[in-house]
Amino acid sequence: MDISLVIPVYNEEESLPPLMEWIKKVMLSQDYEYEVVFVDDGSSDNSWSVIQSLKSEYGHAVKGIKFRRNYGKSAALDTGFDAASGDVVITMDADLQDSPDEVPALYHMIMKEDYDMVSGWKKKRHDPISKTLPSKLFNAVARKASGIQLHDFNCGLKAYKNEVVKEVKVYGDMHRWIPVLAKWQGFTKIGEKVVEHRKREFGVSKFGAKRLISGFLDLLSIFFVGKFNKQPMHFFGTLGLTFLFMGFLTLVYLTVSKLFFNESGIQDRPLFFFGILVFIIGTQLFLTGFIAELVISTRSKEYSYNISDRI
């Protein structure tokens, strides 16, 4: 299998037939052995019925997975990655804003130029400023924080070596941070390609302020997890010991003042309460690190989603 296309679907019934026809045209022109993995993320329209029809029409070239409810794009991609068998795995959105004509060039960059992954860059966008301006801010912060020089972290059109998608676990809303996740796993050859961004023909955009906020929160999460995933005690333990030491010194100072300098009213001084508070916080942070270490030692790395049908 040369290429697996993984396509999350959420209420995109109108765009699926023309998208599949377009994909087939491109694949046949390049003589690729391919499969298209549609993951229906709990659509409330007839998207699953359309996917079933495409399976009947295109046979083994189409795989379909249906969630019982909406889990989000990350869950759809993660499940699609598990089902993908192609040497190169390419993701794209189902709304026809990503062009299948970009697939051959992306495939070439992975197979011939030996990139671990290639991210699309929608340099010229057909979106309102309410979407493009926050996106530019988001990407600028992401570049600075990650050290990965991509212009469009959130572009749905990306290509990966198969081993990358099998190693990277995507959950929550982490799909936009797959380049960072890949880098943490040691896949450091990450490229970028300018791709066509087409106007939306069907449906409505899923973008909103909530996604922007969650994106920045996920950025904080992913860097914490990436740095301290295996050693949370290094973070919580260091903070805890620092606070414990501050509290200990404060209380020792007050004790010495009471015993050797006969100072009165120490129990009413703000410094007394500060010392106790800092000592308690330090103890809690240290215990948090200890508990996190226990969780990591016993946790399962597998995430599961409730699938109602598969074809």
Image: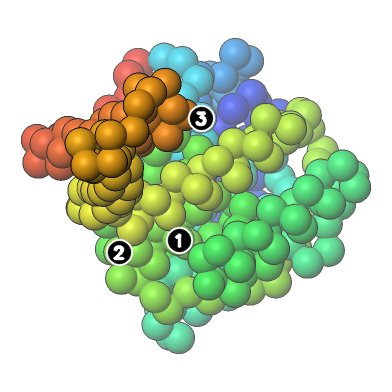
Most foreground residue, 221 or 90: 221
Which amino acid type is shown beneath numbered disc 3? Gly
Task: Give the residue number, with chain letter if any, for mark 1.
Answer: 180
As drawn, the residue found furthest toward the front would be 262
| Residue type, label 2 | Gln
| Foreground: disc 3 or disc 1 | 1
- Identify the element where label 2 is drawn: loop
> Dot 2, how many residues are within 10 Å of its Cα: few (below 14), some (14-19), or many (20+)?
few
For this orientation, the residue located farthest to the right is 129
The N terminus lies in which quarter of the figure? bottom left
Residue that carries the numbered disc 3 in the rendered image: 72
Q: How far separated are the C-alphas under marks 2 and 1? A: 9 Å
| Secondary structure found at label 3 | loop
| Of the image marks 3 and 2, the number of the one nearer the N terminus | 3
Q: Is residue 288 left or right of residue 96?
A: left
User: Which comes sooner in the sequence, label 2 or label 1?
Assistant: 1
Image location of residue 157, percent across then percent down: 59, 57
Q: Could you tell me which residue is drawn at 56 percent across and 19 percent down?
A: 43
x, y (%) of residue 94?
Answer: 62, 40
User: Is 18 situated above or below 305?
Assistant: below
Give the foreground label among 3 and 2.
Answer: 2
Amino acid on which the number 1 mark rests in the picture: Val
Please say whether residue 74 is visible from this viewpoint. yes
- Please, is residue 306 above or below residue 141 in the view? above
Q: Earlier in the sequence, mark 3 or mark 1?
A: 3
Q: Nearer the viewer, residue 88 or 160?
A: 160
Question: Separation of disc 3 and disc 2 at Cα?
Answer: 23 Å
Q: Nearer the viewer, residue 107 or 158?
A: 158
Instruction: Write down the residue under mark 2.
Output: 185
Q: Residues at badges 3 and 1 in contact (C-beta under 8 Å)? A: no
| Left/right of residue 132 with respect to residue 151 in the rendered view | right
